[in-house]
Image (tube, helix red, strand yellow):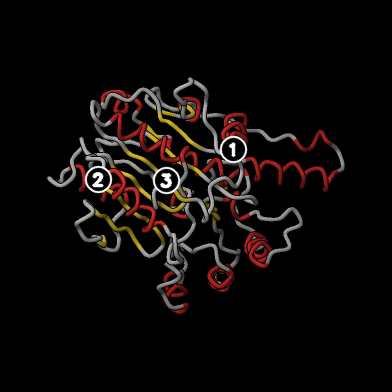
Amino acid sequence: HSRKVHDLLIERCFEGGKHGGCLVIADSIAQACKAMKCLEKYQQNGGQGRRKFMLLIDESDAMRRTQSKTQAFERTLQRLESLGPCLTTMISATPLVNMLEIVTDGLNSSGRWEDTDVEFFNLDPLEDYNGLNELQSLVGDDEKKIFLEQNELTSKSEFAGIPWMNEKAIALYDHALDASASKKGILVLDCSCPRVDAPNNTTDKAEGVQRYYTDRGKDIVVVTIAGKGIKVRFSVDGEWLHQPKGHTIGMVLEAIDHDERGGLKTPVAVFGYTKMRRGISFRSSGRVPTHMLMNHGRGHNLSTVLQTLGRATFNGRSLLKANGIENVTILTTYNDFRACDKLM
């Protein structure tokens, strides 16, 4: 991993006529520059011909941030790509941005729309996959679908002393905890509060939700996930348990399911924001997402919204049904829900 290894050690790994390896870097200018420096020397040491390398870009749509590619990291990534990889693989669950770039580059280079076609093939999901088309909106007592308005849920929102909460959001939690009386494996994903350390943060909200339902005789385990790590609280009287570095959310949920203070019959709510938007599966062997609150402010691109809602999708629809749940219930804005549905 380039962040942890000195430049000279990386270069030594690629020395010699037959040596090769895998260099993993983060999406930062410093690490991309470090990779270019090592790759240039690696190519020059190839003897008669330049050594080849492949470039794999995970979450590639997030690397394309402006149409004109004016951001410093975008320009650095272009320099890395200009070193001439023999194969470039762009990996993304939301490839629309990459496809638009291919179309635009084709049109700019030839001026003909005939050269802008993008060939691709679809891989059908497994029959047990619970996708976006299986997600349903929260429904009120009047049988009407409930949606958030844009900017309805903010740092100023409060319900029963719980920050980032209102009547619609508490209705989603009520739906989840009412279901727990006859069902199991309830898992609420709350991606509504972007604050980690500032007042009215994810920890404050988690404690407020736990206190609110404890006062009403209902147990709920709360979890927060942020860049600094994961922590768990089993009860209002308990302490926050900071999980060991390297533990994934899946490992933490698995431990909760097998802990006498928790178990599959006890609902779990996970509170996060940035860590709940890409790349992480929120599930255990016996518990999958059943409810999700997604609240993004203005300015988030469609890929981010779709990736976030994707945390409520998973392989394991049969497990959802075995736990007594028919569909994953979502509360978000109408525009975000509709856009994700149309894009998929």
Q: Disc 3 or 2, which lies upstream in sequence?
A: 3
Percent across and percent down for residue 255 are 20, 48
Q: Is residue 276 left or right of residue 62?
A: left
| Residue at the image position 46 percent from the left and 39 percent from the top | 167
Which residue type carries mark 2? Thr
Q: Is residue 92 visible?
A: yes
How far apart, in angstroms, are the residues tagged by discs 3 and 2?
18 Å
| Residue at the image position 48 percent from the left and 26 percent from the top | 124
| Residue at the image position 28 percent from the left and 36 percent from the top | 287
Image quadrant for the N terminus? bottom left
- Residue neighbourhood size for the residue with mark 3, other residues' Cα within 10 Å, grouped as few (<14), some (14–19), many (≥20): many
Q: Disc 1 or 3, which lies upstream in sequence?
A: 3
Q: Which mark is residue 322?
A: none
- Residue neighbourhood size for the residue with mark 1, other residues' Cα within 10 Å, grouped as few (<14), some (14–19), many (≥20): many
- Residue most toward the right? 111
Q: Secondary structure at mark 3?
A: strand
- In the image, residue 35 above or below residue 337: below
Q: Are marks 1 and 2 in contact (CB under 8 Å)?
A: no
Percent across and percent down for residue 59 are 53, 50
Q: Which residue corresponds to mark 1?
A: 336
Which residue type carries mark 3? Asp
Front: mark 1 or 2: 2
How far apart, in angstroms, are the residues tagged by discs 1 and 2?
32 Å
Q: Are marks 3 and 2 in contact (CB under 8 Å)?
A: no
Which residue type carries mark 1? Asp
Q: Which residue corresponds to mark 3?
A: 190
- Residue most toward the top? 143
Front: mark 3 or 2: 2
Percent across and percent down for residue 17 are 47, 67
Report which quarter residue 312 is drawn in: top left
Q: Which residue corresponds to mark 2?
A: 214
| Residue at the image position 55 percent from the left and 67 percent from the top | 28
